[in-house]
Image (cartoon, helix red, strand yellow):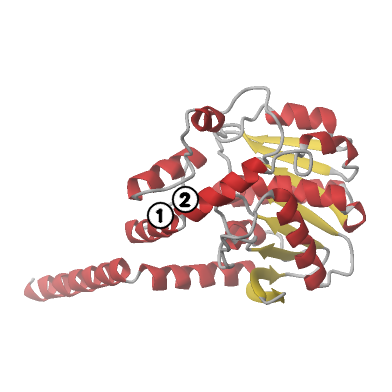
Amino acid sequence: MKRLLVICIMFGALFYGVGVWIKNNPQAVLAYARDAERGRAGLTQAVVSIDGEAYPYLVGGSGPAVLLLHGFSGDKDNWTRFASHLTADYRVIAPDLPGFGETARHLDWSYDLASQRERLEGLVAAWQLEQPFHIVGNSMGGQLAGLYAHANPQRVLSIAFFDNSGVQSPQESEMAQALARGDDPLLVNSLEDFERMLAFVFVEPPPMPQAIKQYFATRAVKYRDFNAKIFADYRRGGGRSSALEPLLKDIRQPALVLWGDTDRLIHVSTTQVMQRKLPQPTVVIMEKCGHSPMIERPEETARHYRAFLQQQGY
């Protein structure tokens, strides 16, 4: 009995010590978990340099290329679990878009989507993609994907819009209502704000230890003002040069429109407009899912996407 008590105390001390180490070293824990996820997905990180600017991206797999574009305040690892279901048959490329992730943040740059499209064109050239590719985008990244496909139709085989911006929804979203009140639910000032933001974006937020959540919250607070600048640039640049809705009729590639039915940022009724205006739409609505389905339910989202590609013969 005494020996059992000693063993229990030893294990208790061990688990307590591990818990303390995780709490005190969230960045190291996150890096380990991130690298493990990338390894399971068959992805590695690479960097391309353009005019002295470093642009990190994830790449892996073989076959037709699939370019994945994250949304506002996201980064390349938004796609890691989703990509794990693609790399067996496709070459996946997921960059940090300028101003996000590990890229530099320039106060003197404009991050409106017309400028971001030009930077994306530079990235595609730097990657030396010899063949046309598939493109996928979530939220702001979906709008950017549409702008790229419209400007470069010969480069794009198909396009997938995941809860994209750039189209006026028939029914106003909670995000639109909040912005009208002068509130932006995506800008974070505290851990409580971060938890509120997760609940706003997801029906079921991804589980994470409290120390990791605190780390992400601290990062979000750190970049809060810069993210506000990017969002302001985006809204100021919402004219003819970067509006997506008027361009939909000209996007001739097969298009998947995939949405979470509980998206509070961009209302699911947006799919009605896109289905009406896109020449070749396939529409999928995921039940009880929020704004970023590839994060919230990566396997299911990838299954819908692969079915779409296979339907087109890819």
Kindly identify the residue that appears in the image at 89 percent across and 35 percent down: 279
Q: Nearer the viewer, mark 1 or mark 2?
A: 1
Q: Is residue 203 visible?
A: no
Which residue lies under the disc numbered 1? Answer: 221
> Which residue bears the numbered disc 2?
206
Residue at 62% from the left image edge and 47% from the top image edge: 233
Q: Residues within 10 Å of mark 1 (few under 14, many from 20)?
A: some
Label 1 or label 2, whichever comes before in sequence order: 2
Quarter of the figure with residue 256 = top right
Confirm whether residue 102 shows in the render.
yes
- Which secondary structure lies at badge 1? helix
Q: Residue 25 at what x, y percent from top left?
A: 33, 71
Give the quarter of the figure containing the C terminus: bottom right
Q: Is residue 117 left or right of residue 31?
A: right
Left or right side of 28 for 90: right
Question: Marks 1 and 2, Cα distance to the nearest angstrom?
Answer: 19 Å
The quadrant of the picture occupied by the N terminus is: bottom left
Residue under the image location 52 percent in, 28 percent down: 180
Q: Tell me: residue 37, above or below residue 201.
A: below
